[in-house]
Amino acid sequence: MSDVDEILNGAAFHLLLFSVGGICFGAETGQVTEIAVYNGEKGEDLFWFHEEMGYAGKTVTYQSPVIVTIKSGTASPYRVIIDSMEDITEFSQSDITLFPPLLEPFVLRRGLWGLLPQQERIVLLLDFQRLLREKSAGKSI
Amino acid sequence: MEQSEEPLKSELILNELKKRQRTKDVVDVEEERVKVIFFTCGENRYAFYGTDIREILPASDISWVPGLPDYLPGLINVRGDIESVIDLRYFLGEEKGDHLKHLIAMAVRGDFHSGVMIDSIEDVIDIPVSAIGPPLATLNGAARDLVIGAIEYDAKTIPLLGVGKLANLITI
């Protein structure tokens, strides 16, 4: 049985929760190979999360930036600077809500595929690999 | 003592009242009525069919989501259901306002459902269908794509907006 089948059958999956610019995101921990503190380094394979996601016109201040390295399936790693890492938390498929149909075409382009409504906030579920794929597709057009 | 054949006064009154009631019933049946909601958005008044609006929600936090166009400010949580929100001002050429000062009208038509930002509710009334005229020919811009009729109200002509048209405008 694949991971996807297991999750669809109720198995728990683990999400890395973090916030950037006051918006909370959750990414599956299986996509992340490394987490390291950001010390001001630069690199062609290193990207700011808000730029990757298109925080158009929004001023974003990072409080405690960390670099997450994502499995890219290519020789070069995909490294993204995120902020305010909270926790790694267990969820099940039944916790996930779909995006309203009106928004789905727009958010999928940013790698966002679902929602976790919580008491005071809504966590946006992010697939970093989808984000990378959409980004690569955008470049090749 | 022989009773008079003259109808009683009460009988006459009763008959007349019944006749009037029947006439009124006929008028009511013939004159189909619809509920309309008058609201403000920016500097102007507009209307929606009441059947297209499920409820009006007070101003609440709209959760911003990256990657959405300007006319989709984000998400709201309506008793556990996550709904999209549309900024109607964008389509009506009205100036952009403060998200926290808006009411949200929950618009529903067929498969389409979304919150729509409005400023205030002016009135909710039943009007005869015949009171809805064709859209004003003088309308221009994006508003023309949303208007399905015009209603005389409070000595002004109010554009009646179609939720179906709004859905088409956004989903195409």
Image (spheres, coloured by chain):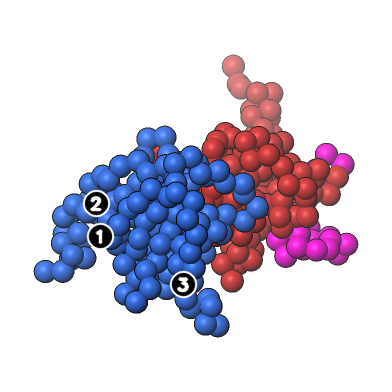
Quadrant of the rendered image containing residue A29: bottom left
Q: Which mark sits nearer the N-terminus, 2 or 3?
A: 2
**Nearer mark to the viewer, of 2 and 1:** 1
Same subunit, tags 3 and 1 = yes
Under mark 3, the amino acid is: Glu
Q: Quadrant of the N terminus of chain B?
A: top right
- The residue sitting at 29% across, 51% down in the picture is A15
Q: Position of residue B30 (x, y in %)?
A: 66, 53
Q: Which chain is blue?
A: A
Along the viewing direction, whichever of B36 and A77 lies nearer the viewer: A77
Quadrant of the rendered image containing residue B35: top right
Do callouts 2 and 1 mark residues in contact (Cβ within 8 Å)? yes
Q: Which mark is residue A134?
A: 3
Q: Which mark is residue A30?
A: 1
Q: Which chain is red?
A: B
Q: Position of residue A37 (x, y in %)?
A: 38, 48
